[in-house]
Image (tube, helix red, strand yellow):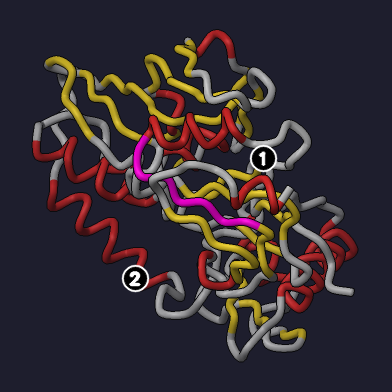
Amino acid sequence: MMALAKDMSVQGELRYDEPMGSHTSWRVGGPADLFFRPADVDDLAAFLAQLDRDTPVFWHGVGSNLLVRDGGIRGVVISASRALADFEQVDGLTVRAGAGLPCTQLARQCIRRGLGPSEFFAGIPGTVGGALTMNAGAHGGETWERVVSVRTMDRNGEIHERAPAEYSVGYRSVTGPANEWFIEGTFSFEPDATPSMEAMNAMLERRKATQPLGLPSCGSVFRNPPGDHAARLIEAAGLKGFRIGGAEVSEKHANFIINRDAATATDIEELIEHVRQTVHDQHGIELIHEVRIVGEVAA
């Protein structure tokens, strides 16, 4: 597989045995066999068309909401965020955004054009592609509430136009056609909703005040259970400040796990499990983590 990759004709950047700790917000993770950063959509399609059919493919955005185990990722990691960061206003109430565009930038672009409700996108610490993949949301808004259509790319490099009806969308959950990845989303907004840059900035200031943004984390680790908040349950279980290795439950926000002191992915994964089990034992509630855990355990 690696020999085949070296013979590929691509315009983008190919790296071998790339440490994924350099590409995740937790700053942990073992090496990817192959790490590809395409130059553009055509380069991405050409790469996939040349790739051996048996080679595993993992799509990577900015590495938030992601835990890569210490043994790394076998196969190819595709990091398309730089190549897919375009934005276009299609008409008065509709915009098109590439999967690599940060959600904060989507919010700013929409607010500048008077398109709302869009401020909530600023509360999503990832890209449009990641938001589409998990129906990310913040401050009462969810990504797929605004989706008109999406474009995807399949394992062969072919592009597909898809409608929301082709997906099953729930809370932090999206299921659709297999072996396709989002490369673009088209979003519509309301004619009578006037967004505010001041409101968005106030939202970002609240995040700074209530979340440990200066330390490596993935954002919220667990989904909120119906009628409650994961952070409240974790704090009530006495877990703020609890540590395993270099990983710690944040004192500032209990649903954040921070890389306090050279944590490993194993430290973080074990802490996630400890929090889940403790909350279940004390409250009888099963927390479900929304962070994606991938890769192999270190030998």
Q: Is residue 43 magenta?
A: no
**Position in image of residue 279 (x %, y %):** 80, 63
Residue in front for this viewpoint, 172 or 236:
172
Taking depth in this image into account, of 40 and 128 the one nearest to the observer is 40
Residue 293 visible: yes
Q: Which mark is residue 208?
A: 2
Residue 138 is at least partly visible in this image: no
Q: Residue at x 82, y 65 (%)?
A: 273
**Residue lying at 70% horizontally and 53% vertically, measured from the top left:** 2
Identify the image quadrant of residue 85.
top left
Amino acid on which the number 1 mark rests in the picture:
Pro
> Residue 248, located in which quarter of the rendered image?
bottom right
Q: Nearer the viewer, residue 203 or 21?
A: 21
Q: Where is 207 relative to 85, above or below?
A: below
Q: Is residue 145 left or right of residue 20?
A: left
Q: Is residue 39 magenta?
A: yes
Which portion, as a residue range, is magenta?
A: 34-40
Residue 96 rendering spot, x and y as whole percentages:
27, 25
Secondary structure under the numbered disc 2 in the rendered image: helix
Residue at the disc numbered 1? 226
Residue at 69% of width from left, 67% of height from top? Answer: 234
**142 lies above or below 215:** above
Q: Position of residue 238 (x, y in %)?
A: 72, 78
Q: Quadrant of the C terminus?
A: bottom right
State left or right for residue 284 relative to residue 158.
right
Q: Are marks 1 and 2 in contact (CB under 8 Å)?
A: no
Q: Which amino acid is tagged 2?
A: Lys
- Left or right: residue 187 versus residue 246 is left
Q: Secondary structure at mark 1?
A: loop
